[in-house]
Image: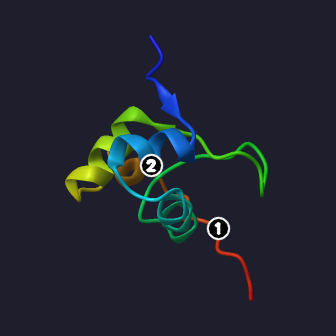
Amino acid sequence: MLEPQYTPAEAAKIARRHVVTIRRDLVGGTLHGSQRVDGGRWLISEGCLSAYMAGAECQHRAASNVTPMRRAG
């Protein structure tokens, strides 16, 4: 069974943070999320959002060897 996934707006409402904060943390790597293509729509799994809210690193992040993309400039 697949874990629920949230958009940044939905995650912001659940985490009680501003959507801009959620997007900034996604780009910066503080919050683990995924995009199909660079600049595409972000999706955040329920486990990653729960870990973010608890101030911990999610299981996906700990097992991943991929670093977040940071935009130049």
Residue shown at 74%/89% (left/top)?
A: 73
Vertical side of 23 occupied by 59: above or below: above
Residue shown at 34%/36% (left/top)?
A: 47
Disc marking residue 1? none
Q: Crowding at label 2, few (<14), some or many (≥20) Cα neighbours within 10 Å?
A: some
What residue is disc 1 on? Answer: 69
What residue is disc 2 on? Answer: 12
Please name whichever residue, 66 or 31, is drawn nearer the observer in this view of the structure: 31
Please name whichever residue, 29 or 15, is drawn nearer the observer in this view of the structure: 15
Q: Secondary structure at mark 2?
A: helix
Residue shown at 43%/57% (left/top)?
A: 31
Asked if residue 72 lies left or right of residue 51, the reply is: right
Residue shown at 74%/42% (left/top)?
A: 36
Residue 26, percent across and down?
A: 53, 60
Residue 38, percent across and down?
A: 77, 56
Which three-letter amino acid code belongs to the residue tagged 2?
Ala
Q: CA distance from mark 2 to mark 1?
A: 21 Å
